[in-house]
Amino acid sequence: MLQGKIALLTGITGQDGSYLTELLLEKGYAVHGVVRRTSNLTRSRIEHLRSNPEIYGKRLTLHYGDLSDGTTLRRIFAQVQPDEVYHLAGQSHVGLSFEIPESTSEEIAMATLRLLEIVRDQPRPTKVYHASTSEIYGRAVESPQTEETPFRPSSPYGCAKAFATHLAKVYRQSYGMFVCNGILYNHESPRRGENFVTQKIAGAAARIACGLQEELTLGDLESRRDWGHAREYVRAMWLMLQHETADDYVVATGETHSVREFVEAAFAVVNLPWEKYVRSSAAFMRPAEPVQLAGSPDKIRRVLQWEPKVSFHELVQEMVEAELARCREQKA
Ligand code: NAP
Ligand code: G4F
């Protein structure tokens, strides 16, 4: 058990933030999270921690803030004095970034700059994890991609993340700051947001099986992704900050599957013929898609001894079963 370390998370209420918080609490950290003011106080992914009197207010503290509000972020840093910062917050939907490019770029690119500047001014060294993404490779020049593959983003989201990733490297090289880019490929879980394709499919398969939904409309069924499990990927984030030197790491399985394969596997869990229920519509297609996104986890395996263990089929099964449990609760 590590005693006495303090971690500050942006994006603590998101999929990754919630799993990372659990991991850090298990490791004995005091965890601080930045949360936005919302009209509803329930923060579903961390509610089990917030409602636990042994944890909340003792080892877990939430601070109101927003990525656009530099003054408040500075104040939080002064108060918390973190040893490690995990910067996970931001608009994370690639498709939506074509509709809201300006706020996406503000939240991802400028906010990362703002945060790095705050860390630069800290009186003692603070380690930073930056949530980069495979989307920086976009129309990739090679497959699988490594830490050396050139950036060729194909969405506003990818462009903003490419800026932030370059900036993180520049701050590391120019100021000697301990900043790591985790170049993560798609990672999923029962806590995945509802408008990402895996959760949309898992939820629909379960609801159709329970008689709560009639059909599922998706976009491009032939699109391929390298899908892993979020719980394993947040451990990779933590490992990066425990290493003696800061560096960038691809975090991936190295294996790709199509959206169609995800659909087939999900409907197989509920024993239904997917062709009867699934449609494809241009409404869910994007102006551009990345090409052949598959990551090579060689470096992280070699340097940090991290490797993914959950298989594609185990991931699909876990997500569909979690959705089935939700449906049963809803029907009860
Ligand atoms: P997520 O579930 O969408 O969570 C995003 C988090 O950011 C939420 O806590 C959200 O708060 C917060 N946020 C958004 N805008 C904010 C703002 N202006 N001020 C403060 N907080 C803000 O995302 P995720 O899947 O956990 O991903 C975490 C990070 O990794 C993201 O940066 C994402 O782009 C990146 N990433 C994800 C994947 C993946 O496959 N999941 C892969 C590569 C990189 P609310 O709860 O208030 O909305
Ligand atoms: O689930 P998606 O929306 O994830 P996407 O675009 O790959 O982005 C996720 O992973 C990135 C890492 O590579 C992260 F940086 C990012 O923050 C996010 O977490 O879409 C996956 C694929 C795409 O090709 C999309 O066009 O599924 C295709 N798709 C087909 N039908 C659909 C749908 N995507 C969504 N969201 N909804 C559909 O109905």
Image (tube, rainbow, N blue to C red):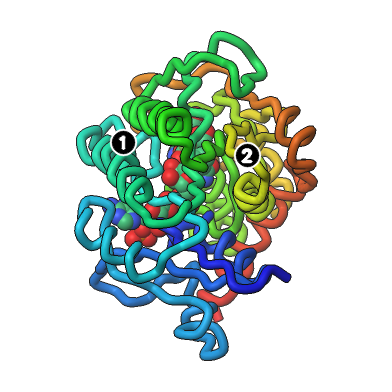
For the point 39% across and 51% down, the residue is 89
Instruction: State the CA–CA distance, disc 1 to disc 2.
Output: 24 Å
**Is residue 206 rendered to the left or right of residue 158?**
right
Q: Quadrant of the C terminus?
A: bottom right
Disc 2 designates what residue?
245
Secondary structure, mark 1, is: helix
**Residue 109's mark?**
1
CA neighbours of label 1 inside 10 A, class few (<14), some (14 to 19), many (20+): many
Q: Quadrant of the N terminus?
A: bottom right
Where is residue 189? Give x, y as percent.
61, 54
For the point 38% across and 56% down, the residue is 123
For the point 57% across and 67% down, the residue is 5
Where is residue 16? Give x, y as percent.
53, 54
Q: Is mark 1 within 8 Å of ligand 1?
A: no
Q: Are marks 1 and 2 in contact (CB under 8 Å)?
A: no
Q: Nearer the viewer, residue 213 or 258?
A: 258
**Is residue 315 rendered to the left or right of residue 213?**
right
Where is residue 29? Give x, y as percent.
59, 70
Please state which amino acid type lies under the numbered disc 2. Answer: Thr
Residue 43 appears in view = yes
For the point 53% across and 52% down, the residue is 204
CA neighbours of label 2 inside 10 A, class few (<14), some (14 to 19), many (20+): few
In the rendered view, tell whether residue 217 sits above or below residue 9. above
In the rendered view, tell whether residue 213 sits above or below residue 135. below
Where is residue 23? Give x, y as percent.
64, 64
**Residue 251's mark?**
none
Residue 196 appears in view = no
